[in-house]
Amino acid sequence: MQTVYGCNHYGCPQSDTLRKETREAIAATSSEDDAVEVMVKRYGPKILTEPQRTGFSLTAWVMPFFALGAGACIIMGILQKWRSQTRVRDTASAKKPVDPALIDKYAKTMDEEIEKD
């Protein structure tokens, strides 16, 4: 989107006319806000460089932040789910302690096998 004063088209036909009308609106009213209102009444809200912060146009201001927040919540939820699945897997695959009597039994068996050779 370009402003009237920033139109980069060579010999922009609309910018000269709009600049003239804007100057006239400023001269005919008591403040810049009134001049803007005159231009909006003449051309509609599309003449503004940014959406108004009232009514339905308010969504243009709110939606980017809402979408960013919703996206962050979704990503956090996915990461928490992955983390909990990893914990469950780690818990399930954790080694159970071996009975010391069983270790002694196999150690004796290995010692006997070594002595035989």
Image: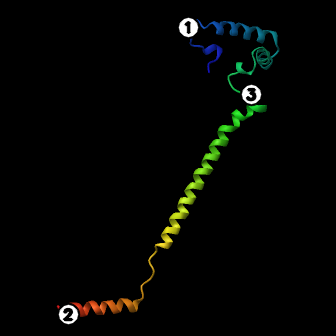
Identify the residue at horizontal 50%, vertical 72% (top origin): 91
Task: Look at label 3 and name its amino acid.
Answer: Gln
Sequence order check, earlier mark of 1 and 3: 1
- Distance from Cα at disc 1 to Cα at disc 3: 30 Å
Residue 107 lies, with reference to residue 25, above or below; the image says: below
Sequence order check, earlier mark of 1 and 2: 1
Query: What scheme was used to colour the molecule?
Result: rainbow
Task: Look at label 2 and name its amino acid.
Answer: Glu
| Tag in front: 1 or 2 | 2
Task: Look at label 1 and name its amino acid.
Answer: Tyr
Q: Secondary structure at mark 2?
A: helix
Which of the 4 image quarters holds residue 102? bottom left
Residue bearing mark 1: 10
**Nearer to me, 67 or 17:** 67
**Horizontal and vertical percent for residue 27?**
78, 9
**Which numbered marker is on residue 115?**
2
**Horizontal and vertical percent for residue 45?**
74, 21
**Horizontal and vertical percent for residue 12?**
60, 8
**Horizontal and vertical percent for residue 67?**
64, 42
| Tag in front: 3 or 2 | 2
Q: Secondary structure at mark 1?
A: loop
